[in-house]
Image (cartoon, coloured by chain):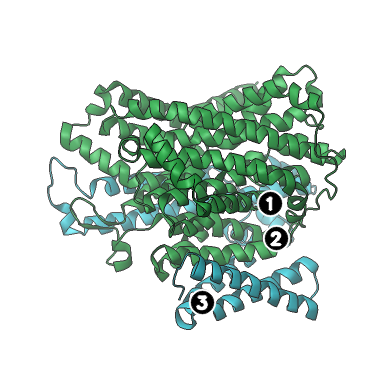
Amino acid sequence: MSNPASSSNDRPPSSGADAAATADAAGGWSHIALGLVLAAVAIVGLLDIATNAELAADTAPDPGPAFLPWLLLWLLLAGGIAHAGMAALRLPARTPEHHRADAAMPQRPALSLPPWQAFRRSLIGTAMPAAMVASLIVYERAILTFGYLAPSFLFAFGWLAVLQSRETRTTSAAGVVRSALEAAAAVGAIFILFRFGIQVPLP
Amino acid sequence: MIEGLLSAAQAILTSPAALGLGLAATLLGIVLGALPGISSTMALAVLLPFSFAMPPTHAIVFLMGIFYGSVYGGSLSAILLNVPGTPGSMVTQLDGYPMAQQGRAGEALTLALYASTFGGIFGFVCLITLAPVLASAALAFQSAEFTAMMVFGLAMLAYASPGSTFLGLLGGVIGLLIGCIGLDSVTNIDRLSFGHHNLQAGINLIPVVVGLFGLAEVLSLLGQRGAHPIGIGKVGRLLPPWSAVRDTLGTATRSSAIGVVVGIIPAAGSALAVAIAYAQEKRLYERRETFGNGNPRGVVSAEAGNNACVGGALVPMMTLGIPGDTMTAVLVGALLVHGLKPGPELFEKHPDFVAAVYLALALAIVFTAILAIPGMRIFARVVSMPPRILHISIVLLCVVGSYAVQNSAFDILVMIVAGCAGYVMNRLGMPTAPVVFGLVLGPLLEENVRRTLIVHGSWSVFFERPIAAALLAVSVATVIYPALAAWRRRAIALRRSTP
């Protein structure tokens, strides 16, 4: 499978086409990873079922509690491998010209990227979501230890301040105070609604 | 049914709490639906935990208010910001925003309200006439037919979901697998819990839904650095000329009919309904070039189709227990929490609750009309609120709402994991809706497959019973067709490229 753009290596490719090729390469490797992860999950599940002696008992005519999970796990395994395989077949081929171009100009956006570079580019735009997930895990631990109010206020205040400075591209004392007030209002409103509105005992 | 309707009317219409709840929920639904990035499913999922403490009739009034209100609310941001509040309103912006740019935002909003109300009433009438008939027919269904119906629903969802059908199917398999985690309901044998005691009780639907549709959306929005959309500040005159209403009556009727039919098809969803309704009107109208440049028919067709879809989507949910779209999948989860299992038995065992669903939808339509007229100018300001407050409030609601299901911190972790998975799936173009469908249908599918095999002792029953065989054949065709079509396209392209 050859990359149709590879013949034009001697002239700078258009940025749009290059970006699309980069996205294809990054997306391709991500899809291979997705397929392999799904297959790995299926193997772990199949091992769990295979090693569970209780599930091996004959329950005829009932197909038994292992039947549907077993069927689904095999489908997931086959589907994951098929998806990874199809994504691999769609990857743009790397020609010797690509390797030479990358070696000559490491910063140049390559038409088809090596896996590590494609993976690095696929991470662009994930810093904020990753930070949110990390902070959520800390927040979940914190509300179990310190209760709902204080950790929730700190979590909301921190994020509102960060997002406000990102929106306005400045950090000011007024902005920080506004974030604190917004956080207090949001946390307080949710606390009142759950605690007194629908009587859910928050931690 | 009449007795049930009277009983539900007495329980809801004479209760100031239920009416107030319905009004507040509809208002909340309109506001949330109007905010860009907040889909109806997300609004419903995030606010679902509030319904747990309510009696079932109040809960359905609350949830239906959010559901219907958010579907209408989506048109506000589509018209004023050129950003669809919900997927179902993405066609509304094609003519709604040009109308707003021409200084006719108020007219476009009122036409959208008129079309929404028309479509809503049309869908409601179809629901109350079709649902009892379909439920009676479904009573003759046996476990083989139910199994085939669920497979059909999953196949349709995989086909209709944005992105690859193959990934949609894998999503459905993942959802079904999550539904299998924990103790088997028949033998009490532990499956796929890896000895973790929290997993032995199974994965609760609500934290997964909240994570997939709430947290995942916020994570996606946090990853974008786009500027906050600038809205059309001036709403202008609200009342459109009478001729615009009169001339679009046919459009509203046709589009509503399309909305109901598409809504009834499991998993087809409102985005498909509005696309078909809009295309149909464009095809029928003589001056097609005016579509996309502020033609009121464009707004009316999209909104009538979108809101009629609500009634249509409730038909398979109520009668067969198969969700018509992701929003009704969340509603199924809510009913299960309240100990109510949607399906033909619901009509036999709880006719008063079925009547309450009808009444709740009717109230939501009326409340939306009542709230929208005086509130349009206020909603126009609300849609411009800074998104950061909304995003963080939603994350807090996701955490607290997941915890509130069983007062369990484990559910918060489930929600976070589901949110991460949903975010990754969104980035890779893997639809998340089939996961929820699979999770909702998983236990039902397993129960029906096993019952079929215990009673009949052979797989051949699925091919001997005509309805089951037909549904399975359509399911297989639905899954295979995209692959065959892609193969044919490639073959034609290859033939053309070779001299």
What amino acid type should be assigned to the residue bearing mark 1?
Answer: Pro
What amino acid type should be assigned to the residue bearing mark 2?
Answer: Pro
CB of mark 2 within 8 Å of CB of mark 1?
yes
Q: Which chain is displayed in cyan in the rendered image?
A: A
Between B387 and A201, the residue placed more toward the observer is A201
Element assignment for label 3: loop
Q: Which mark is residue B36?
A: 1
Q: Which residue is mark 3?
A: A148
Residue B291, percent from left and from top: 77, 28
Which dot, 3 or 2, sits closer to the camera? 3
- Give the residue displayed 33% in from the left and 32% down from the top: B148
CB of mark 3 within 8 Å of CB of mark 2?
no
The Cα atoms of the two marked residues, 1 and 3, are separated by 29 Å
Element assignment for label 1: loop
What amino acid type should be assigned to the residue bearing mark 3?
Answer: Tyr
Q: Which residue is mark 2?
A: B387
